[in-house]
Amino acid sequence: MQKKYGFPKISTGDLLRSAVERRTSLGKRAKRSMDKGFLVSDDIVISLVQERMEKADCRDGCLLDGFPRNLAQADALDKMDDGSSVIVIDIHLDEKEIIDRLSARRICSRCQTIYNLSISKPEHEGQCDACGGRLKQREDDQPEVIQERLRVYHDETEKLIGYYQEKGLYNRVDGHGDIETVFHRICDLMNHEFGKTNRPEAAR
Ligand code: AMP
């Protein structure tokens, strides 16, 4: 998605995991919440996003992944952005599929490439195709943490549907199907919103 549209992707999960990896004091604070499936405090997440969005590569826009996750963060985002060209995309999946996908997810401990043991397996078990690094399961992809993350979603994040519907910015995309199919659905929506017509040949 970032290649096709030329916007950098800002994933708050990635920013937080990187701080945890580097054992910064922010990372240590964040890890306690992340391991349990809770949201990291708004002040930490908002300042990370704010700092990242101020970089030169975000001047023409960016893709926010995993942010905002509650009303306070949405409000903070409204203040960071003039709201003139925001496109909100909710990739929707039923709960069983979410649990199956998260449980089967593996991530390279070296280059962070993501695999799925059901739909995008590595060639050699436990080993990254791209760099040979060891594949691991995220702590928060354990079954009990997944349940907690879903509870947090229903308690906090789901409210954003109404929030963005009221602003006329909400779009839902069906997340069922393979990566390429979902990618094309998102591109169709983006192209419609941007008034663009070109479509990429492949998802990666
Ligand atoms: P993700 O990689 O988006 O699934 O996020 C992994 C974890 O990072 C979440 O379960 C939260 O603990 C934390 N996190 C990511 N994004 C946010 C956010 N916007 N607000 C609070 N916590 C977040």
Image (cartoon, helix red, strand yellow):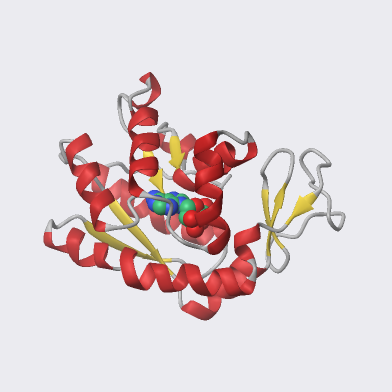
What residue occupies the far bottom of the structure in this picture?
Answer: 96
Near-viewer residue (45 or 121): 45
Q: Residue at x 39, y 43 (%)?
A: 45
Q: Quadrant of the C terminus?
A: top right
Near-viewer residue (68 or 93): 68
Q: Residue at x 42, y 57 (%)?
A: 39
| Rendering quarter of residue 63 | top left
Q: Kindly tell me whether residue 66 is visible in this rendering.
A: no
- Image x and y of residue 117, in percent: 73, 65
What residue occupies the far right of the structure in this picture?
Answer: 124
- Image x and y of residue 121, in percent: 75, 60
Q: Is residue 38 above or below residue 26?
A: below
Instruction: Answer left or right for 41 relative to 168.
Output: right
Q: Is residue 76 above or below residue 167?
A: above
| Rendering quarter of residue 123 | bottom right
Q: Kindly tell me whether residue 32 is visible in this rendering.
A: yes
Instruction: Answer left or right for 137 relative to 27.
Output: right
- Image x and y of residue 57, in percent: 39, 23
Q: Residue at x 54, y 63 (%)?
A: 36
Near-viewer residue (126 or 146): 146
Instruction: Answer left or right for 60 relative to 5.
Output: left
Near-viewer residue (57 or 13): 13
Q: Residue at x 45, y 44 (%)?
A: 12
| Rendering quarter of residue 46 | top left
- Image x and y of residue 76, in percent: 23, 43
